[in-house]
Image: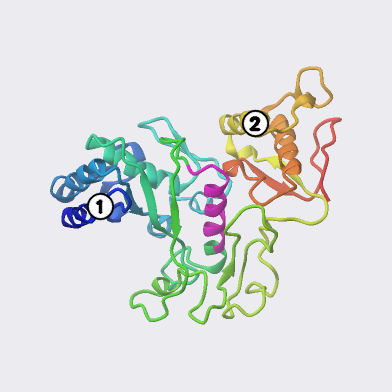
């Protein structure tokens, strides 16, 4: 890396081209809880510290390959699948830091931050150079499958593009994430999962559909086990998880997210950045009762969702909200629905 840096410098390209090298999470001695993470002793001083020194000197970033699938596969008895797939869950508290995590992905990234902090490197940004979930696996590869792959990658896209890419430890971090992979590698050796991380088959047909951007129409998340022919799932029906809807829909609070997380999302929705119309949930107003965080969050989330035209990702709030097709009950208050 230093030789490459010297070559770039001689060509006056060093300010335009940044050098880095990806590391796998196996470079960590431990990653749970995130606050106790550290780099392996055989790598920390001879490899990691010199590399971080160079990254700091050149104002570059650390590239990390993060795969929640591997952690879930090895520990499915103790790791919730919802936690691994960015689905609503009750969260896990890091006893060391007191921070609460709602996704395994965030916990893994914070483990890397903590390991860097242990070496006194707190100023180097992280780029996730690889992450993904296999759409097929061997019998012993727990969690591999079309539905889980579509859920993980689709929810990850929303997690990043809705402005929620920061982690509990670094909430303001702007993390770039690269999905692995574009194509299935059908000739790759190893377990079945190794050949099935792609969004497309080698013949360019889709393995499953996910939205890779916000504010677009589309069919939500679907998968196709028959080499991409048509848009149906394994049972002949669509796979749900629609991101743009038809008919009446509402955005409601996810009680499982907990009061703190709901309150934070409520504050955002009603704040200048969110722009939701929250006048009706002020004291004495028509929708102030029931006076609970969940009820007020539902009103605010739905206002935000409808103002955004029910666009993709506008009813997510980092897992604190979800879409329903039945009108939510909020005392005597009725919530508007788009059509």
On the rendered image, what quadrant is the N terminus found in? bottom left
Vertical position of residue 331 compared to residue 184: above or below: above
- The spot of residue 161 in percent (x, y) is 55, 48
**Residue at point 13%, 49% (across, down):** 46
- Residue 335, quarter of the rendered image: top right
Camera-nearest residue between 277 and 138: 277
In the image, the segment drawn in magenta is 150-165
Residue 33 in view (yes/no): no
- Give the side of residue 166 with respect to residue 115, left or right: right
**Residue at point 75%, 47% (across, down):** 309
- The spot of residue 167 in percent (x, y) is 45, 40
Name the residue carrying label 1: 12
Residue 222 in view (yes/no): yes
- Give the side of residue 59 with respect to residue 179, left or right: left
Mark 2 or mark 1, whichever is nearer to me: 1
Q: Secondary structure at mark 1?
A: loop
- Residue 223, quarter of the rendered image: bottom right
């Amino acid at each position: 890396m230093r030789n490459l840096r010297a070559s770039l410098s001689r060509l006056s390209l060093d300010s335009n081209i940044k050098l880095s090298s990806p590391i796998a999470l196996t470079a960590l001695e431990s990653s749970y809880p995130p606050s106790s993470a550290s780099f392996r002793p055989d790598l920390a001083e001879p490899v990691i510290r010199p590399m971080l020194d160079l990254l700091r000197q050149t104002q570059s970033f650390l590239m990390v390959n993060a795969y929640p699938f591997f952690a879930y596969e090895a520990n499915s008895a103790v790791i919730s699948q919802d936690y691994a797939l960015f689905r609503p869950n009750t969260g896990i508290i890091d006893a060391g830091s007191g921070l609460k995590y709602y996704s395994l992905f965030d916990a893994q990234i914070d483990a890397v931050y903590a390991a860097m902090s242990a070496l006194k490197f707190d100023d180097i940004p992280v780029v996730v150079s690889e992450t993904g979930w296999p759409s097929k696996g061997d019998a012993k590869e727990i969690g591999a499958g079309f539905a889980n792959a579509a859920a993980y990658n689709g929810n990850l896209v929303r997690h990043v593009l809705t402005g929620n890419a920061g982690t509990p430890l670094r909430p303001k971090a702007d993390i770039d994430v690269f999905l692995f992979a574009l194509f299935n590698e059908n000739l790759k050796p190893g377990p079945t999962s190794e050949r099935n991380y792609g969004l497309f088959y080698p013949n360019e047909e889709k393995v499953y559909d996910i939205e890779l951007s916000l504010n677009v129409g589309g069919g939500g998340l679907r998968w196709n086990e028959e080499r991409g022919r048509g848009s149906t799932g394994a049972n002949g029906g669509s796979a749900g998880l629609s991101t743009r809807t038809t008919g009446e829909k509402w955005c409601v609070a996810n009680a499982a997210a907990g009061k703190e997380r709901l309150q934070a999302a409520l504050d955002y929705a009603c704040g200048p950045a969110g722009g939701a119309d929250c006048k009706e949930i002020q004291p004495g107003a028509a929708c102030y009762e029931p006076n609970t965080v969940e009820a007020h969050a539902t009103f605010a989330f739905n206002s935000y969702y409808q103002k955004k035209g029910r666009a993709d990702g506008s009813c997510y709030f980092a897992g604190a909200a979800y879409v329903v097709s039945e009108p939510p009950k909020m005392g005597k208050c009725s919530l508007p629905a788009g059509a």
